[in-house]
Image: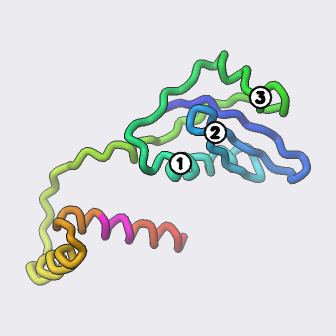
Amino acid sequence: MHYPIIVVPEPEQQAYTAVAPDIGEVASFGDSIEEALANLQEAVELYLEDAEEAPQPSKLEAVLEHEEVREHGGVVAFADLDLSFLDRKPVRLNVSLPSGLVKKIDEAARKRGMTRSGYLAWAADQAMARRQAEC
């Protein structure tokens, strides 16, 4: 979804701040405008982690009246933020695993008070987070 973003130069740090006024004033930083905008996706995901739905983008006229634009020299850009992570509707999958692994999964899930599906989703999420931290 395209959101208006305010990009503010930070001359003292030779950097830029990108602010998403429609998403809780979440901000990201970067040495270039491109880097500040790229970092915004992660900031938005962290901010909306437990949200039920995405906020609607403001009209451009409203964003142009924002303090960061009027008083701090910010300019308005549009960012296509990927909010697909908010779609938490379960999807049925057919997965083939060795029976011994399924038994281990079921045991681990039982110990955590989870269903098999819940445990597999949690484990996949944990593995992806570790992988991303390594990169």
Q: Which residue corresponds to mark 3?
A: 67
**Which labelled disc corresponds to residue 25?**
2
| Residue at figure coordinates x 86%, y 53% from the top left | 13
The secondary structure that most of the magenta stretch takes on is: helix
Q: Who comes first in sequence, dot 3 or dot 1?
A: 1
**Which labelled disc corresponds to residue 132?**
none
Q: Which residues are magenta?
A: 122-126
Locate residue 118 relative to residue 24 in the image: left or right: left
Marks 2 and 1 sit apart, C-alpha to C-alpha, by: 10 Å
Marks 3 and 1 sit apart, C-alpha to C-alpha, by: 21 Å
Marks 3 and 2 sit apart, C-alpha to C-alpha, by: 12 Å
Q: Which residue corresponds to mark 1?
A: 47
Q: Residue 85 location in percent, x, y?
A: 39, 47
Q: Residue 72 location in percent, x, y?
A: 84, 33
Pointer 2 local density, CA inside 10 Å: few below 14, some 14–19, many at least 20: few
Label 3 SS: helix
Q: Residue 11 location in percent, x, y?
A: 89, 46
Which residue is most to the front? 113
| Residue at figure coordinates x 52%, y 39% from the top left | 81
Q: Image quarter for residue 37?
A: top right
Q: Vertically, is 8 above or below 36? A: above
Label 2 SS: loop
> Label 1 sits on what residue type?
Tyr
> Label 2 sits on what residue type?
Glu
**Which quadrant would the C terminus be assigned to in this image?**
bottom right
